Image (tube, rainbow, N blue to C red):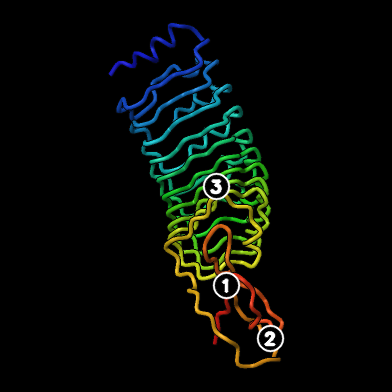
Amino acid sequence: MPQWPLLRALRGGRGTRSLSLTARQLDQLPSGFAKMKALECLNLRDNRLRRLRPDVEALSRLKVLNLGNNLFEDVPEQLICLKSLQKLHLFGNKITRMSPLVCGGLQNLVLLNLNNNQLRYLPPEIHRLENLEFLSLNNNQLQSIPRELCCLQKLCELHLNHNSLTALPEEIGHLTKLKILSLSRNRIEELPDGLCKMVSLQVLDLAGNNIHIFPTAMQDLDLVELYCEGNPLLQKIPVSAIQEEDILTLKRMKTSRNLHLLPVRILLCSYKCFNLHDEGLFGIAVP
């Protein structure tokens, strides 16, 4: 079918900065992109694309590229040449892998959206996306995240909902600028202590995991929103200790300003401390 927006853009000269070819049933890109040197925004979502043309590499000024809802199985390696790219949308494809080469060529990327794909892992080279501020990987098949991801010092939002994560790396605490961390509907059983070092964290979504108890320093996070419904959290069942002097590691539950009752793990010096009367503290006996 004729691509009238593209034809009009080409007739308009090389100064065209924005082009949208959404929902046009494209299975390949029309020729002519190499002539559009000034193009900064290209929207190709809702088509049938499986690959990019080699001449896409000529779009050296491209800042925003939307390839959402197509048929890509890999993150296109041609993207390595798009040095000016700041926002990349690849949601709703069939992507199973992300080449390490791509990470090396997108150092100005600020936003990366890979929601609704089939990714099972991320390459350690993801740390090379050093300017990334927003990363969304909802609805994939990730079983873990590389600790190298925690080197993204500018990251402000990280969305990992609906994956198969069972744990987080201890290095997650290095993400000191992260404000939003979404981890709902995974298989996480325990949170690392490093999570409590995320001094900028405001929103933490842990709903629908397998968490029984939280790290001790969890109460120190200055959270605005905390979601943890759908976890098998310990219930408040106050008990008294039988022994008095033996030194053991016990568990307590502490009231939090984010929840009426937030179970945290605390090390106690003896059973005597276990029986202290402190508002908001309840001992839980563990065999």
Q: Position of residue 282 (x, y in %)?
A: 57, 76
- Establish if 68 lies above or below 137: above
Q: Residues within 10 Å of mark 3 (few under 14, many from 20)?
A: some
Whichever of callouts 2 and 1 sits on the residue coming sooner in the sequence is 1
In percent of the image, x 33 and y 30: which residue is there?
27
Q: Which mark is residue 272?
A: 2
- Does dot 2 land on a helix, a strand or a loop? helix
Which of disc 3 and disc 1 is earlier in sequence? 3
Q: Determine which of the numbered discs, if any, sits on residue 253 in the image.
A: 1
Structural crowding at the residue carrying mark 1, measured as other residues with C-alpha within 10 Å and reported as few (<14), some (14–19) or many (≥20): many
Q: CA distance from mark 1 to mark 3?
A: 28 Å
- In the rendered view, tell whether residue 160 sits above or below residue 231: above
Nearest the camera: 51 or 62? 62
**Residue 11: quadrant of the picture:** top left
- Residue type, mark 1 in image: Met
Discs 3/2, front: 2
Label 3–label 2 contact, CB within 8 A:
no
The residue singled out by tag 3 in the image is 158
Residue nearer the viewer, 247 or 59: 247
Can you give x and y, in whole percent of width and height, for residue 117 in the image? 41, 46
Q: Residue type at mark 3?
A: Leu
Label 2 amino acid? Lys
